[in-house]
Amino acid sequence: MLNSLLHKLKLAFGDPSIRFRIFFLIGALALFRLLASIPIPSVDKNALAAFFANNQFFGLLNIFSGGGLSQLSIVMLGVGPYITASIIMQLGTIIFPQVKQAYFEEGEAGRAKFIGWSRLLTIPIAILQGIAFLFLLQSQGVIPHLDSVALVANIALIAAGSMLLMWLGELVTEFGIGNGVSLIILAGILASVPSGISQTIFAATTASIPSYLAFTLLGLAMIYAVVVVSDAERSIPIAYARAVRGAALSQGAATYLPLRLLQAGVIPIIFALSLLLLPQMALSALSALKLSFASSASLWYTGFLANPWEYGSIYFLLVVLFTYFYTSVTFEPHRVAENLQKTGAFVPGVRPGRETEEYIGRVVNRITLPGACFLGLLAVAPSIIQGLTGVTTLALGGTALLIAVQVTLDLANKIDAQVSLREY
């Protein structure tokens, strides 16, 4: 296995085209980390550190900004607005017939139109999120009160940074290897690991060694579970009817329809995060207008988010519900059954058409439940592990692990596909 890996690496770096793609990816990620280290003006670093230390929810939200939020950098929103715009567009496929036609029926031209709409929608989302975050940070004393000119300048800077990352991610997808947006998030996750490990080592004492050992074992168990569940699938056998071509009779082939356990990926977690964050942003904006009820409600909601048991329970429930919702939106048993019938394929023992649709729907509903519960546990894993081990200097986020594993596996598969193409 080691020889095969070394052979693949030799082929990858020996081919000029693959080598260019790999170095382009490395250069783009280095540029992203440089941008993530440039803060917006007038940031109180001590207040910022205290804000994230006392609010685990925003620490988790920092994952989706690629690590830029914890530094209040010019790319503090990360690729979050673009991801949100893409999700809204996907939901639009079930509401607006034009969007559905572009996404499913118009081929590459329709997909290009769909992506263009997502880019345009990213601009107002980035502006609104920038306004909400600035008001929230002002209310927490992280940044001073900004006058109108400074506020507009910061909003424009933050929105432009998010658009720059969106463009950088698309360049990586086109000229590099893998999905650029996902790789930017992965780079932010990995960038926070060394500092967390160093803090843990310096904070370690003789009495805390058992807790750190337990933390390590739980972390390894989580990594193993994420790897296994990410590749888990339920296979439905598919057979093809015999076909007559001229005087020849071809035997029907047999294959299978793979249904992934995590059909929705990390999208339900993003949905849940967005829904939990929306009241905080709205109340912070209303508090800036000097409304008394908004200030008291904002303080109550901030306390709710700071309580790991209260927000953790709601967070888990929302992730489970959104997993079912998003799976029902993106996976259509009717379309799958219709495509199978058009190609002469069928599920053995099940009639084509409506019965096949109902059978696939039942299977999807059954496998969605364990997948949804697993996603929910991953979402609240930091609170559970820190409560069991008492280790607070190093947060082991299940969401970060899921993203890291899925993106790493996808990147490895893309590189392997490029190498295999050159081998043949």
Image (cartoon, helix red, strand yellow):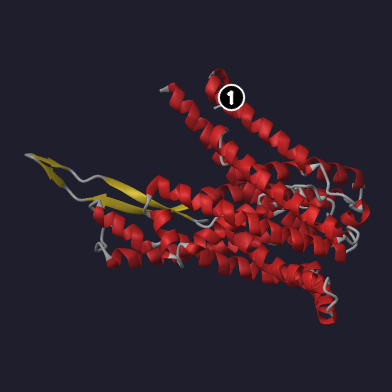
- Tell me if mark 1 has few (under 14), some (14-19) or many (20+) residues whose alpha carbon lies within 10 angstroms of its own: some
Residue 157, x across and y down, in percent: 76, 49
Q: Quadrant of residue 282?
A: bottom right
Residue with the most extreme bottom position: 293
Residue 356, x across and y down, in percent: 30, 63
Q: Quadrant of residue 101?
A: bottom left
Total residue callouts: 1
Q: Is residue 199 left or right of residue 27?
A: right
Residue that label 1 marks: 20
Q: Is residue 4 left or right of residue 364?
A: right
Is any atom of residue 76 visible in this view?
no
Q: Is residue 88 left or right of residue 49?
A: left
Residue with the most extreme front position: 149
Q: Is residue 357 left or right of residue 205?
A: left
Q: Can you say which quadrant of the picture contains the C terminus?
A: top left
Task: Identify which residue is drawn at 60% across, 60% down.
Answer: 375
Q: Nearer the viewer, residue 16 or 308?
A: 16
Q: Quadrant of residue 278?
A: bottom right
Residue 21 to residue 338: above or below: above
Q: Can you say which quadrant of the picture contains the N terminus?
A: top right
Residue 126, x across and y down, in percent: 68, 56
Q: Nearer the viewer, residue 113 or 19?
A: 113
Element under disc 1: helix
